[in-house]
Amino acid sequence: MMKIHKLVFFFFLLFLPILLQAQIIEGGIFDKNTKESLPGATVYLDGTAVSTITDEKGNFRINIKNSTATLVISFIGYFTYKLENPSQYIGKKLRILLTEESINLQEIVIGKGPFSRNQMMKVFKEQFLGESKSGATCKIENEKDIVLYYDVSNNTLHASSRNPLRIENKYLDYYVNFDLEDFKVEYNYKSLEKFNQVRSYFSGTTFFKDLKKSKNAQKRRRGAFYGSAQHFAYTLANKAWEKEKIKLFVGGFQVNPDEYFQVKDTLGIKKVILIKEPLKKNTGFAMRENRISFNGVTSKDSSQWIKTNFNILYKNSKQSVIEFVDKIFLVDSNGNYTPIYGILYGGYIGTLKAGDMLPSDYFQNNKEIIKD
């Protein structure tokens, strides 16, 4: 028996390098027009701390660690390149061509807008970094790269950036590179006042780097995770409501999540399906009789029911309002989900911005630290 065990162990050691290489992606980065190599380009997994830099010949090699995150290639003066589902390219030699930016973002601003740059920058920081303790301590090192303009035709504040934003987050002890793709704040008329905002939105890719990683930072990161969108999606996908101390409400009453959601396991990814819309009784003087439908079955009710949103409460303190735009979405083991804009948030989660963000692989990498 000992000989068999030794043979098995030897067999494992023999193939261990192959197993480790199975997560490696490699290739070269080049200028699309000149075909010249681009040394010093940054290659990273979106939302993580996994990155590398191309060598003097423009080549790179990166371990994606079984991640499903998008592979992002960034180089100053070129459009950012994204490679979705990078695991499908394992074992292949990639040749990636970057296109040089020819549009000067300053040309977007035509004439003088109704608000000063300082006024618009104040709103940008509030809606991009956030006003939490974490967001308030964030510092954007390259503010001059931010281009701001207000479109009076639809009362919308826009922002873009010539280069990825370099953000120092002292509260969570992260250094973040945020490649801003889109930012807008919509208003109900020409204004920058918060009470006139209709909605705000931003998107982009991120790369995280640890700073001091102090004990206080670990505690703060833990606090940032609990009650967040990631935490909610993880709880929902794993049916861990009681363990994660999150309660689900409809119309002011606590409800059983199983009545509204169905969860299926597909190759380690959770598939969540909204099977029942949240409804509440209409207390106004509306129709006395209304037909309502659940899963194709129509019934008659003597009082009118109207659609409402879900509410969640974490530890009886952090309350959020949730609306599902999409009825089907996928959730990974870290609580990341797609489609990312398939869920809209208000309340506590709605206040969380880029300054409160954690790496997309934070939960799995810190399971022991963030036990509640």
Image (cartoon, rainbow, N blue to C red):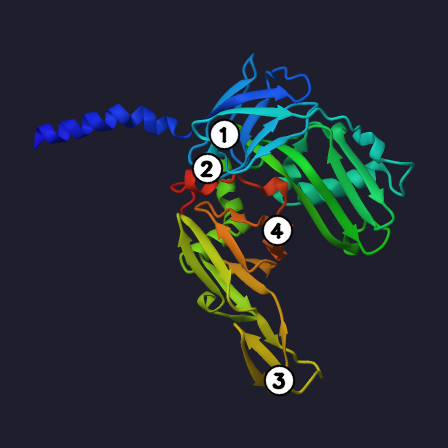
SS at circle 1: loop
Q: How many marks?
A: 4
Q: CA distance from mark 1 to mark 3?
A: 55 Å
x, y percent for residue 150: 83, 43
- Is residue 58 visible in the rendered image? The answer is yes
* Closer to the camera in the image, 70 or 178: 70
Mark nearest the camera among 2 and 1 is 2
The earlier-in-sequence mark between 3 and 4 is: 3
Question: Which numbered tag is attached to residue 67?
Answer: 2
Residue pointed to by mark 3: 303
Question: Which numbered tag is attached to residue 118?
Answer: none
- Residue placed furthest toward the left: 1
Q: Which residue is drawn at the image coordinates 68% and 36% (left, top)?
A: 180
> Are the residues at dot 2 and dot 3 in contact (C-beta closer than 8 Å)?
no
Q: Quadrant of the N terminus?
A: top left
- Residue type at numbered disc 1: Val
Mark nearest the camera among 3 and 4 is 4
Q: CA distance from mark 2 to mark 4?
A: 21 Å
x, y percent for residue 69: 51, 38
> Are the residues at dot 2 and dot 1 in contact (C-beta closer than 8 Å)?
yes
